[in-house]
Amino acid sequence: GDSVTQMEGPVTLSEEAFLTINCTYTATGYPSLFWYVQYPGEGLQLLLKATKADDKGSNKGFEATYRKETTSFHLEKGSVQVSDSAVYFCALNFIIQGAQKLVFGQGTRLTINP
Amino acid sequence: GAGVSQSPRYKVAKRGQDVALRCDPISGHVSLFWYQQALGQGPEFLTYFQNEAQLDKSGLPSDRFFAERPEGSVSTLKIQRTQQEDSAVYLCASSSAMGLAHYEQYFGPGTRLTVT
């Protein structure tokens, strides 16, 4: 079945470091791809999305490109801040027979030290 | 505007008890989803409603789990005869779109269920 595999955490970086969190997927058809973020004490919220191959999603300095040839959607940020500390989830969304669902990776906990 | 709300936020149940978890989606959202998130894991899909119709319940782990959305708005997830393995955070999400894969799902804060 469809699945998402994320880079295992936890990841600890210093402020202003470059961030990459790897995400690869297995899917039949053409899913949309998402990164969700869960800040401490808060609910899941959408960070960015891409709906077709070669699309780039971006938000708050984060970027991810939908790569169909490598079935990947890696999250990157050029210079992280302490406030980026959170758990990040890669997900795909697809529709089968009128029903839709999100399939999530296991999450990557990111800690940024000042 | 108001987001997705869930109640209760925390629930402790003794093994064997029945529980009911409530979700109030964003007003006007036709699609509603339930997910289960075990500690340290990503959310896993349980069930999907489009208005009052339950279109997919393939993720419900057993027949002890039952969800309803009778008027196409508020939804209730019921778990009968709770077991320790049911301990998790139960997330509700809603979306304004039907059958459109790229529309955002808005998540509630979740209900943390602990079965003792």
Image (cartoon, rainbow, N blue to C red):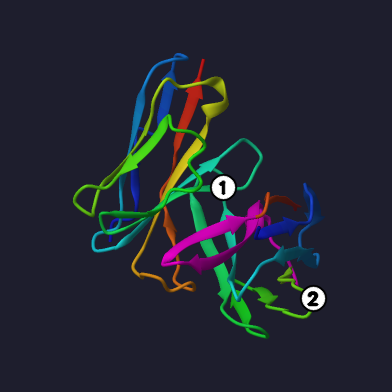
- Residue beneath the point at 55% across and 21% down: B84
Residue ID for mark 1: B43
Marks 2 and 1 belong to one chain? no
- Where's the N terminus of chain B, which quadrant? bottom left
Q: What kind of residue is marked 1?
A: Pro
Residue A70's mark? 2
Please give the range of residues in magenta.
A77-104
The percent position of residue B8, horizontal first and vertical second, equals: 35, 32
- Estimate the x, y position of residue B64 in percent, counting from the top left: 43, 29
Say which chain tag 2 marks.
A
* Image position, residue B33 (x, y; %): 41, 53
Question: Of the residues shown, which amino acid type is indicated by label 2?
Answer: Thr
- The image shows residue B105 at horizontal and vertical percentages of 44, 62
Residue A112 showing in the rendered view: yes
Q: Quadrant of residue A62?
A: bottom right
> Could you say which is closer to the camera, residue B18 or residue A38?
B18
Q: Is residue B38 left or right of residue A43?
A: right
Residue at x 74% of width, y 57% of height: A5
